[in-house]
Amino acid sequence: MLARVTAVSGTPTFKRLPRAVREQQMLDSAVRVFSRRGFHAASMDEIAEDAGISKPMVYAYLGTKEELFVACLQREGTRLLEAIAAEVVGADTPDQQLWRGLRAFFTVVGAHRDGWAVLYRQARGQQPFAGASAEMRERMVEVVAMMLGRALAAQGREVRDTELQVMAYALVGASESLADWLADHPEADPEKTATQMMNVAWLGAGQLLQGETWTP
Amino acid sequence: MLARVTAVSGTPTFKRLPRAVREQQMLDSAVRVFSRRGFHAASMDEIAEDAGISKPMVYAYLGTKEELFVACLQREGTRLLEAIAAEVVGADTPDQQLWRGLRAFFTVVGAHRDGWAVLYRQARGQQPFAGASAEMRERMVEVVAMMLGRALAAQGREVRDTELQVMAYALVGASESLADWLADHPEADPEKTATQMMNVAWLGAGQLLQGETWTP
DNA sequence: GAGCATACCTACTCGTGCGTAAGGTTACGC
DNA sequence: GCGTAACCTTACGCACGAGTAGGTATGCTC
């Protein structure tokens, strides 16, 4: 029997699709199932079924379960990073960079909610992938820290790198958390969420840049 | 054969301990193994071995794997929430409440790093527990939002509940993220991390309270 | 219109790990 | 000092799911 006329994935798939197309369908299904069940609880059978295909096809195209998960991670991760990068290069002042980066970030997350769930909720905990996930975050933190640092320098102020790092970490964490919230709230508007995040980030940062600090 | 003289858990355990003690040892081991491996990859055998006990004991005392995980969640979660609550009640001004809450939070996380890893990195993704985890965060967000709201009211300003909610979410997320960073950096000082977080949170919040907002 | 590559299937094997049955051993009350 | 309850064990059954073997259909090329 060939691939059924209508798969669960929605798009009615007729038999015999070219490899590139099927691979994308499989990745879509994999992301969906991984995000719902978690890496281990997700079964290759369910992924195959969701894609409207039989299991050996998945193995033939994307390899083992781990490799499949990595492929998901890669696709969703680069989608996100590239979208952000593309927006950031078009801006020059620090606040414009931050704003456009945030907007791109929340837009992509809003459009691919379970992709974000896989990236953020799954990869982080599961041991074989935690490293890759942490590395991606590290890069984001680095970039944000650099932006903050440049903004500081422009104002003639100097702050230790560690401080910058920690603050960047907090900002990235806040964004991730809001993204997570966004992923669970279909009614929420990505752009508005980005604005709210920008308020927290920029005003908080702005004060710090002015040399004000809070002390117990 | 009885429980070995020296278990992997460190404390040399002689045979025949009272139930309450063994249960705590098991929970310690469970948290440790769950945090290292993730829920599914962790095996009951490994947990039992780590506790220096045989598997059926774990089942006799703490029940199935899911129940065991829930028990871990419960212990670590209440430990955290109670520590924070105890600190917050002793303060009255909003910034003191926030500060003492944050300090308690980072102190507990610093002292029980893998407890945090289980709570935050594991429970969040694995379907059966995501709900409980989200609920706990929800409570935290609610409390923070309330604190912000009171601070606002004291300054005669009024903000829509949703806005408060989102900002609280961002602050909680930033804290979680720093906690996560703390869990991976044994050299870091919880109190200092709390101070840095307080700076981001309070200065950011402070500006918002003054009515300032950032606009694209 | 024969050949060949590609897309696709059904139907297995086999390891791993949850959960349990059935039976030893120690401490404590009386 | 002895029964009994609590503590603890070894050794298994069994299900589930990753990965594979081997075979069938389809369409493209010359």
Image (cartoon, coloured by chain):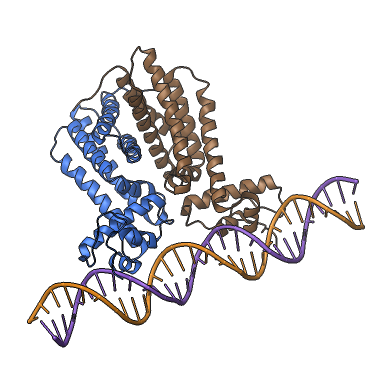
Chain colours: A blue, B brown, C purple, D orange
Q: Is residue B54 visible?
A: no
Residue B215 vertical position relative to residue A138 in the rendered view, above or below: above
Residue A152 vertical position relative to residue B37 in the rendered view, above or below: above
Residue A49 vertical position relative to residue A195 in the rendered view, above or below: below
Q: Is residue A200 visible?
A: yes
Instruction: List x then y, in percent, for residue B145.
Output: 40, 25
Q: Nearer the viewer, residue B156 or B181?
A: B156
Instruction: List x then y, in percent, for residue B31.
Output: 53, 48
Residue A31 vertical position relative to residue A18 in the rendered view, above or below: above
Q: Residue shown at 44%/29% (left/top)?
A: B102
Q: Quadrant of the N terminus of chain A?
A: bottom left
Q: Residue shown at 36%/35% (left/top)?
A: B174
Q: Residue shown at 71%/50% (left/top)?
A: B17
Q: What is the residue that sits farthest to the top in this orientation?
A: B156
Q: Residue shown at 41%/50% (left/top)?
A: A125
Q: Nearer the viewer, residue B194 or A95?
A: A95
Quarter of the view holding residue A143 = top left
Q: Is residue A98 left or right of residue C15?
A: left
Instruction: List x then y, in percent, for residue B149.
Output: 39, 20
Q: Is residue A157 left or right of residue B198?
A: left
Q: How many marks?
A: 0
Instruction: List x then y, in percent, for residue C29.
Output: 85, 45
